[in-house]
Amino acid sequence: MSPILTNGALRSSHTYVSVANRLLNYDILNQGIGGYVYDKNTMTPMEGYQPDKIIIAMGTNQFDCETMTDVEEYYQCLQKVYGDTPVLCVTPLWRGDRPEGHDVLVRFCENVKKIAGQYPNVTVVDGFTLVPHLPEYFLDNLHPNCLGMELYGRNLVNAIRKLGF
């Protein structure tokens, strides 16, 4: 049986976090796990560790939820755990796998911006602007492929520099 070859970011060195880190040279502790959602129970302090900055970039797993309670509680808990630590909220990226849900996704992203933007230490970056909305940048019209990750990382760095974050 032949292996299945894909063009996705299957190696950690190809993720947008690694791309951004190569350009910024930050000391990054990447806590990102595929499939995570806004869940206040995942926001636990790490004894002896206080980050200088926090970047939150959740995906679209909750975009069609009925309420924004989970997002609200997540940011409330973030505030309690990390106080005034500067936070960059990257709203979800475009997804082309469910065109019928586009308006719902846009509404979800706007609500995330509104909730995160209530906190003075949180700066919001519009994830829709980071990767072109074209299938050639996505593995499955949902997850960026290697080229999409490269653009995501580079465009995120440009946003970080522009914002002075």
Image (cartoon, rainbow, N blue to C red):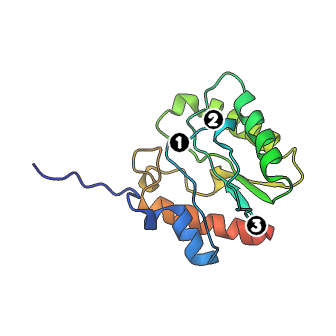
Please report the residue visible at 58 percent of the width from the left and 55 percent of the height from the top. Answer: 31
Tell me if residue 23 can be seen. Answer: yes
The residue at which mark 1 appears reads as: 95
Q: Residue furthest top?
A: 66
Q: Residues within 10 Å of mark 2 (few under 14, many from 20)?
A: many
Contact? badges 2 and 1 (CB < 8 Å): yes
Based on the displayed image, in which of its 4 quarters is residue 162 positioned?
bottom right
Question: What residue is pinned by disc 3?
Answer: 52
Image x and y of residue 56, in percent: 67, 52
Mark 3 packing: few (<14 Cα in 10 Å), some, or many (20+)? few
Circle nearer the N terminus (3, 2): 3
Q: Is residue 44 left or right of residue 162?
A: left
Q: Which residue is mark 2?
A: 105
At mark 1, the secondary structure is loop
Q: Nearer the observer, disc 3 or disc 2?
A: 3
Looking at the rendered structure, the secondary structure element under dot 3 is: loop
